[in-house]
Structure formats: structure tokens, C-alpha cells
Amino acid sequence: MQTFTHLEFLELAQNEKTLKESLNNLETAEPERSPKKQTINNILNYSKALSVKKSKTVDCIEMILN
């Protein structure tokens, strides 16, 4: 087991404090981004309307059913 001197422990504690502050600054600096509800609905509607069928002559056939 490794032993630390008092000064090494203080340095570790200071480094830990600095890292925590940096992490908190990163979290508050840029809020979490997410897509708009309309964008999600557009993608879901497209996926419902898309039909993909396997074919013997070509790899697959893609068709929009709307």
C-alpha cells in the first residue's frame, strides 16, 4: 500500500477540487441539446410511410406509401 505525505495529500485534494470545478463548469456552460418535437414527428412519420421490400432481381425496393 502506498503512503502519502501531508503535502502530497494536500496536492491531491487541491487537484480533486480543481477537477470538480472544471467538470461543473462544463456541465453548466452548455445546456443539453435535443431535437425539436416536430423533427422527431417528421422522422417517425417518414419511417411509418417507408416500405422496403427485398427483390430477387435488385437488392431491395424502397417505396413511400403516402
Image: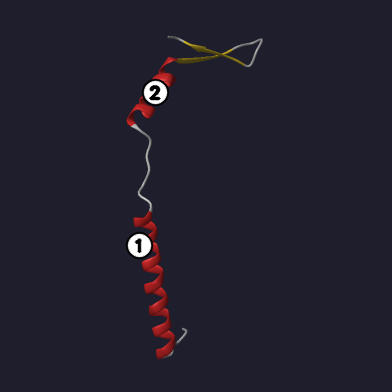
Q: Position of residue 40 (x, y in %)?
A: 37, 29
Q: Position of residue 26 (x, y in %)?
A: 39, 58
Instruction: Examine the rendered structure and indicate whether residue 24 appears above or below residue 49.
Output: below
Q: Amino acid at mark 2?
A: Asn
Q: Which sits in the foreground, 16 or 55?
A: 16
Q: Badge 1 is on which residue? A: 24
Label pair 2/1, CB-CB below 8 angstroms? no
Indicate which disc residue 42 carries. Answer: 2
Residue 51 in picture, x, y percent from top left: 48, 14
The amino acid sitting under disc 1 is Asn
Task: State whether residue 55 is above or below residue 36.
Answer: above
Q: Where does residue 49 sit, x and y in percent of width and height?
A: 43, 15
Residue 58 relative to residue 66: left or right: right
Please tell me how crowded label 1 is: few (under 14), some (14-19), or many (20+) other residues with Cα within 10 Å. Answer: few
Q: Quadrant of residue 14?
A: bottom left
Please tell me which residue is depicted at 63% across the width and 16% down the height of the picture.
Answer: 59
Direction from residue 55 to residue 31 in the image, left or right:
left
Please tell me which residue is depicted at 37% across the width and 61% down the height of the picture: 25
Which residue is located at x 45 percent, y 9 percent?
65
Front-most of 65 and 3? Answer: 65
Quadrant hosting residue 9: bottom left
Quadrant location, the C terminus: top left
